[in-house]
Each structure stands twice: as C-alpha cells, then as structure tokens.
Image (tube, rainbow, N blue to C red):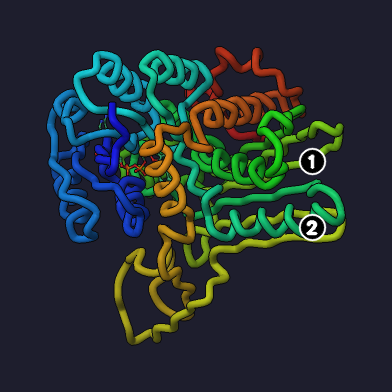
C-alpha cells in the first residue's frame, strides 16, 4: 500500500474513553475519524455528532463490524470497548486485515490490554499474523507533565547524580461510570486491573533510562495488597444495586490496590515502583499523582493542583456535572478546573503518536508487548495479594492464571 497521507480512523466503542479520544484528536494533524461501531447505536450517533462538533470527522455509524472494517476509508481502529471484548474485536480486526478486504494498517487498544495473560497472548498472536501495527493506549506516559518530567529527571538529575531509585504513581477517584466495571467476572478485576495498569506503565516509563532499550529494566519481584474498603459495605453496595443493578456483595472486586514492583537495571541497580489506585477517593475528582526520587532530585505531579480554580457560592446550583474535572464530586465552593483534560491526561499526546506512527508505518513506542508486560505484572500483583507475600517475577506462573476476583471467589480479608 502506498504511504498514507491521512489516517482514517474507525472506533469500536463510543463511550467514555472514545469521547476522550475525540477530544485528544483535536489538534492532531492528518487524521479523520471516519467510522464508528458500537453496541449501542444511540451512543454511536452521539459520538458521531460530537466528532463533527469538534471538527475531527464525520464518522459513519455502522451496525455491522465487518462492514466498518472493510470500509476503504478506515486505515486504523481505536478499540475502546469494554475489557471483556478486547480479544474478540482484536481477532476480528486482525482477520479482516489478513483477508485484505479493507485498508487496515494498525490497531490501537485501550488499557488494560486484556483481562489476563492468556487473552493478551492471543491478541498479540492475531495482530502479528495479520502484519498489523499495534498500539497500546496508555495515556499517562504521554501526559505533558510526565514527558517533560522525565526529560528533566534524566537530562539533569540522573545525568549529574545517578539514576532515579523510586517512582510512585497513584490514580484515585470515586468509582467507575459504567456497570461493567463493577462486575469483575466481566471486567476481569477491580481497581488493580482498571487503574494500576496506568500507574505501572507510568512508573516503568519514568524509571527507564531514555537512552536504553526497555529490556534494560527488568522486573524482579511484585508485592500487592488489595482490599474492598468502601463499596462492599451494605450502604454502598446497595447504591450500586440501585444505580447499575449489580450484586457487588456476591461478586466483589477490590476498590483499593497497593503494588510494589522491584526492578533491576542493566548495571545491577535496584529501582522500586510504588503504585496505589482506588475507587474510593472522594475529593474534587480524579487525582493522578506521580513522584520520582533520585539521589539529589525529585519530581512531583498532582493533576488537582491546577493553575485554575473557580469558586461558586451556595446560591449557584449547576447540578451534578463533570464540567471541571473527570469524576467530579462537588459542584460548589472552591474547585480545581483542568482547562483541557485531554491534553493534561495525555490523550492528545498518545493519539498524535499513534496517528504519526501508523502513517509512517512504524510500530508505536507503546505496543501490545508493553501491554502484555503490564498484564503480567498485574497478574503477579493479584497472585501476591492472594498469597499474602511478595512473589518473584516469573511470567510462567501467570501464563494460565485467573485472579480470584475475576472468578468471583475472592473475598476481602476479614479476621
Ligand atoms: N485511558 C483511560 O484512562 C481510560 C478511561 C476509561 C476507560 N478506559 C478503557 O476503555 C475501554 C472502554 O471503557 P469506557 O470507559 O469507554 O467504557 P464505557 O462503558 O463508557 O463505553 C463502552 C462503549 O463500548 C460499547 N460496547 C459495550 N459492549 C460492546 C460490545 N460488546 N461491542 C461493541 N461495543 C460495545 C458501549 O456501547 C460504549 O459505547 C476499557 O477497556 C477501559 O478500561 C480507559
């Protein structure tokens, strides 16, 4: 195929993350969103209208996936459907590309790559067989603060004083927006699977020497604790039943996860990644924090410490909204406002990188092998939490592993 001048994108899924990508694609050159396929035609229609409003395309709404994938104006797929269908759709995209009916060059999938290692491996096998480029959508490593922070840490701190030895990342909010997240047998897990994937890749990115290959930083051990701190209580589990119709009591998931990964670099230095994620943080809204510590330097990011705060008195009632920040919890008083969340959270950076990579026929810097490693680390995390001890990083032991949370057998620790 001749080199593409413009990338036509088709979306599978048109929900929360897909809409963030539309905002991320604003300001990215040489791309047009040309198609969307979703389980819900009304949400696909809304997505299409939003794309038009934002000026990123006029996507045709498809009710049949294969018709979308063979649309000659679709060169790449952004797979933004729930976790349980990542494998099915990755296979469908790969099969279509293998048969060569369409014009597909690449596929980008939202985090987590898959619910377990088995699924992740099958996805990778399918795209490799089809010769497709594959991007792993981990927005946090494209956050301008994280990218610039890494340049400063390594370009000034590490260069003069030695490599960073500790990276911390936390993602916390008050709980997911859709029913499927609250059904761990469907989603694959709780806050560890949903959000620790972000924190693990962000810390790995920051700890990795930018002048070296990713293989220079090797995981050696993983330790995790998971708990259900808020949503399993009778009051909050009934609120989930009312809001989503889910029975969280009979099949609970963790709403808190602590994970520590011990890495060793190619010089034998130890570096630690410390991650915390939760669905039980009540503050202004989503809070992403990142820290890096080295011998003579440190770095801090906190997305709720913005340059913009607004104050609305008690006489102003705007009602529940996410106008100021994602997962906003209050609508009055002093509130941080993130002027462009798609930029701050890294969607614009990652979408630009994926588009440019696919146009140039290059594998993106975050690909499905990275997604697989993160799934392996998370599976070690679940295993460690189940055993109650630190586990050696040994991928063979999680090859066929399904966490108890995903099987519905996990119960929080109660003496
Ligand atoms: N990068 C991030 O920070 C971030 C944020 C949210 C979600 N995500 C990831 O994005 C993916 C989607 O999450 P979301 O929050 O957008 O979910 P969502 O529930 O908001 O939207 C899901 C979309 O997929 C569609 N859908 C559901 N089942 C489908 C099926 N079987 N076939 C086709 N379409 C189907 C729905 O109609 C909806 O349009 C998940 O893998 C999630 O982990 C990433």
Q: Residue at x 17, y 49 (%)?
A: 48
- What percent of the width, then of the height, locates residue 181? 40, 38
- What percent of the width, then of the height, locates residue 98? 30, 15
Residue 157's label in the rendered image is 2
Q: Nearer the viewer, residue 389 or 27?
A: 27
Q: Can see residue 251?
A: no
Q: Earlier in the sequence, mark 1 or mark 2?
A: 2
- State the image quarter where residue 60 is shown: top left
The reply to whether the C-beta atoms of the residues labelled 1 and 2 are less than 8 Å apart is no
| Element marked by disc 1 | strand
- Vertically, is 90 above or below 306? above
- What percent of the width, then of the height, locates residue 305? 57, 70
Q: Nearer the viewer, residue 382 or 228?
A: 382
User: Would residue 65 be found to the left or right of residue 373 on screen?
Assistant: left
Quadrant assignment for the N terminus: top left
Q: How many marks?
A: 2
Q: Residue at x 39, y 19 (%)?
A: 131
Quadrant assignment for the C terminus: top right
* Residue wearing tag 1: 271
Q: Residue at x 53, y 55 (%)?
A: 143
């Amino acid at each position: 195929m001749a080199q593409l001048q413009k990338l036509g994108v088709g979306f599978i899924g048109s929900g929360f993350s897909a809409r963030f990508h539309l905002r991320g694609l604003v300001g990215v050159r040489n791309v047009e969103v040309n198609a969307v396929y979703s389980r819900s035609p009304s949400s696909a229609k809304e997505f299409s209208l939003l794309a038009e409003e934002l000026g990123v395309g006029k996507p045709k709404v498809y009710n049949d996936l294969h018709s979308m994938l063979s649309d000659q104006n679709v060169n790449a797929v952004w797979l933004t459907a729930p976790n349980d269908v990542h494998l099915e759709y990755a296979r469908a995209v790969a099969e279509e590309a293998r048969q060569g009916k369409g014009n597909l060059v690449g596929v980008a999938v939202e985090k987590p790559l898959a619910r377990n290692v088995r699924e992740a491996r099958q996805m990778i096998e399918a795209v490799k067989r089809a010769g497709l480029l594959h991007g792993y959508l981990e927005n946090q490593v494209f956050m301008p603060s994280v990218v610039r922070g890494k340049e400063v840490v390594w370009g000034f701190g590490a260069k003069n004083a030695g490599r960073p030895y500790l990276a911390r990342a936390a993602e916390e909010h008050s709980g997911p927006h859709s029913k499927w997240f609250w059904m761990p047998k469907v989603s694959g897990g709780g806050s560890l699977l949903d959000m620790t994937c972000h924190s693990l890749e962000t810390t790995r990115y920051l700890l990795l020497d930018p002048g070296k290959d990713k293989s220079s930083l090797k995981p050696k051990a993983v330790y995790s604790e998971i708990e259900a701190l808020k949503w399993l209580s009778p009051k909050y589990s009934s609120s989930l039943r009312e809001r989503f119709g889910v029975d969280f009591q009979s099949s609970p998931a963790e709403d808190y996860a602590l994970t520590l990964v011990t890495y060793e670099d190619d010089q034998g230095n130890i570096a630690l990644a410390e991650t915390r994620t939760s669905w039980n943080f009540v503050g202004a809204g989503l809070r992403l924090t990142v820290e890096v510590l080295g011998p003579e330097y440190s770095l801090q990011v906190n997305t709720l410490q913005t340059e913009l705060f607004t104050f609305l008195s008690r006489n102003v009632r705007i009602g529940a909204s996410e106008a100021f920040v994602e997962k906003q919890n209050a609508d009055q008083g002093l509130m941080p406002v993130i002027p462009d969340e798609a930029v701050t959270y890294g969607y614009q950076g990652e979408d630009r990188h994926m588009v440019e990579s696919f146009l140039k026929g290059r594998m993106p810097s975050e690909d499905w092998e990275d997604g697989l490693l993160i799934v392996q680390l998370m599976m070690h995390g679940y295993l460690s939490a189940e055993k109650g001890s630190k586990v050696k990083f040994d991928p063979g032991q999680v090859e066929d592993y399904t966490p108890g949370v995903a099987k519905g057998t996990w119960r929080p620790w109660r003496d």
